[in-house]
Amino acid sequence: MAANIAIKNDRGYTPFLTWRSAAALCVLLLANAVFAHAQFSFDPAENTMFIDDAPEMEVVAYGKNVIVRKQAKGVLAIGGDIIVEGRVEGDVAAIGGSVTQREGAFIGGDVFVVGGKYKPEGAAPLRNEGKETVMYAGYEGELREMAQNPSQIFAPSFTLTFLAQRAFAVLFWFIVSFALITVAPGAVSRAIVRFHLSTFKIVSIGFFTLAGATVAGFASLQFLPNYFNAMLLLMMFALLMLSYVFGRVALHVSIGQLLQKKFLSEGKRSEAIAVLLGVVVWTLLLSIPYIWSLAVLAMFSAGIGLVLTARGKTSWQSS
């Protein structure tokens, strides 16, 4: 054994507990106290966490299913399903999974489901009055796989489906970029000039704004009412998406013009070729394992920076 239980002295054997035994005993006592206060168990074969009695516990599970048998304060499952058989006083949220409320079970807070469904079994599920149910059923398989195998986010597998998606992305972003240039040529041209003249400044402004907005978003979840959080997060999401699209189009044209100027003679240059070259280059960057995450961050930062620094009128036509 690693620790002695008794030693011999002049008076015979005297019980003795070394520091290792004492530490082990403390760990056992602490574990017993924790499980007595919040009883839960895990079944690896079923990849399921069972919550028996945890009235003060906010349960968070990654890539696992959660079954609330008796009571919990709140439940969040990313990449797994939630089954409420007992009582949840607060919110229940599943990303990449579904929420099932058994007949007679109670959910006191909001139900938030992305990539799954909310499935109450009773005709009149027990909910607190005025609580909301937000559900988006798309991409359940992808979100579940992403949560259970997070490494694939940074290193996707090069399958035929993956290559087909990249080809579709080239076509989609070529159409979007060309349409935006046609509808708002002045805004795109001024953005490209600003990006060429102050690349580091624009990306820095966008990056720190994105970081600040992320921190503010998480802080609002803790201190602001749920209905206000929903509106605020929706507005932030819309602005981020608009910035991403605008920044991506500007980067498409910018890199396409540089490549066109370097490798094509003046007679063979055109706006369509510049857009196509930029779209292909950025699509390839977004397909490289690990590198794609930095490319997405660069696009968001550039887009936000370009939107925040938009002012004045300039000409961007390249020679």
Image: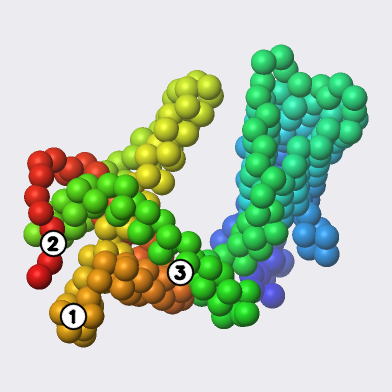
Q: Mark 1 highlights which residue?
A: 267
Q: Mark 3 highlights which residue?
A: 170
| Helix, strand or loop status at disc 1 | helix
Residue at image location 43% in from the left, 60% down from the top: 175
Per the rendering, the mark at residue 86 is: none
Residue at image location 66% in from the left, 49% down from the top: 138
Q: Quadrant of the N terminus?
A: bottom right
Per the rendering, the mark at residue 317 is: 2
Q: Are marks 2 and 1 in contact (CB under 8 Å)?
A: no
| Helix, strand or loop status at disc 3 | helix
Q: Position of residue 230 (x, y in %)?
A: 51, 29
Q: Give the amino acid at mark 1.
A: Gly
Nearer to the camera, 200 or 211: 200
Q: CA distance from mark 2 to mark 3?
A: 24 Å
| Helix, strand or loop status at disc 2 | loop
Q: Is residue 245 visible?
A: yes
Q: CA distance from mark 2 to mark 1?
A: 15 Å
Q: Residues within 10 Å of mark 3 (few under 14, many from 20)?
A: many
